[in-house]
């Protein structure tokens, strides 16, 4: 199946497919088995760039596939549950306050100082961002969250 970004026979399409294949190889899986967010060549480029630049084998990072519908479940735009403080920006601010780096300043890939910091942040979510967790009948704030 052809991806929406792919124009058959172009060098650009070939390069994008190659990047996806490279990431799949690093992950030890077939390209078609990569999570949906990693089928996007722009995201793959970002991840491959990070992997190339990092200094250790540890990858203390979270990759967010945001779901805007999760922040637009009421008539109040961009606010979960219609509450002004329940926004994507609030989650991002919480990540940054807990020591992450917003890799590429795209609000997608957040790098933690070490693996323990991800666990600390995840415990922090239950206390500081309980509204960001799954709620029955409301779209989730993320389609996927990859560690």
Image (cartoon, rainbow, N blue to C red):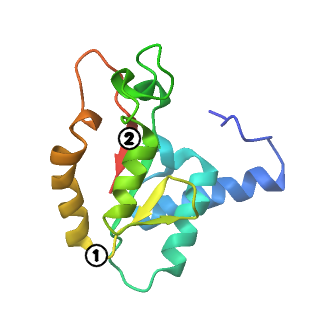
Question: At x 37% / y 27%, what residue is drawn?
Answer: 80
Local packing at callout 2 (Cα closer than 10 Å; few below 14, some 14-19, many 20+) is some
Question: At x 30% / y 64%, what residue is drawn?
Answer: 98
The disc placed on residue 93 is: none
Q: Is residue 28 visible?
A: no
> What element does badge 2 sit on?
strand
Near-viewer residue (9 or 16): 16
Q: Position of residue 121 (x, y in %)?
A: 23, 59
Q: Position of residue 1 (x, y in %)?
A: 62, 33
Residue farthest toward the bottom in the current orientation of the protein: 55
First-in-chain label (1 vs 2): 1
Question: At x 25% / y 63%, what residue is drawn?
Answer: 118
Near-viewer residue (112 or 44): 112
Report the number of numbered marks: 2
Local packing at callout 1 (Cα closer than 10 Å; few below 14, some 14-19, many 20+) is some
Q: Quadrant of the C terminus?
A: bottom left
Looking at the image, is 82 positioned above or below residue 14?
above
> What element does badge 1 sit on?
loop
Q: Position of residue 129 (x, y in %)?
A: 25, 43
Task: Tell which tag, 1 or 2, sits nearer the viewer.
Answer: 1
Question: At x 34% / y 29%, what residue is drawn?
Answer: 140
The disc placed on residue 144 is: 2
Q: Is residue 115 visible?
A: yes
Q: Which residue is mark 1?
A: 114
Looking at the image, is 48 positioned above or below residue 74?
below
State left or right for residue 86 relative to residue 8: left
- Residue 126 found in image quarter: top left
Question: Label 1 vs label 2: CA separation?
Answer: 21 Å
Near-viewer residue (28 or 63): 63
Residue farthest toward the front in the current orientation of the protein: 84
């Amino acid at each position: 199946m052809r991806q929406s970004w792919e124009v058959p026979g172009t060098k650009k399409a070939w390069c994008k497919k190659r990047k996806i294949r490279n990431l799949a190889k690093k992950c030890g899986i077939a390209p078609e088995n990569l999570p949906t967010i990693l089928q996007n060549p722009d995201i793959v480029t970002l991840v491959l760039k990070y992997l190339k630049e990092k200094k250790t084998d540890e990858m203390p990072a979270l990759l967010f596939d945001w779901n805007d519908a999760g922040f637009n479940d009421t008539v109040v735009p961009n606010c979960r549950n219609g509450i002004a403080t329940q926004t994507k920006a609030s989650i991002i601010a919480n990540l940054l306050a807990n020591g992450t780096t917003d890799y590429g300043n795209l609000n997608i890939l957040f790098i933690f100082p070490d693996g323990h910091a991800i666990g600390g942040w995840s415990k922090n979510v239950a206390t500081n961002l309980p509204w960001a967790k799954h709620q029955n009948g409301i779209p989730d704030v993320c389609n996927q969250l990859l560690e």
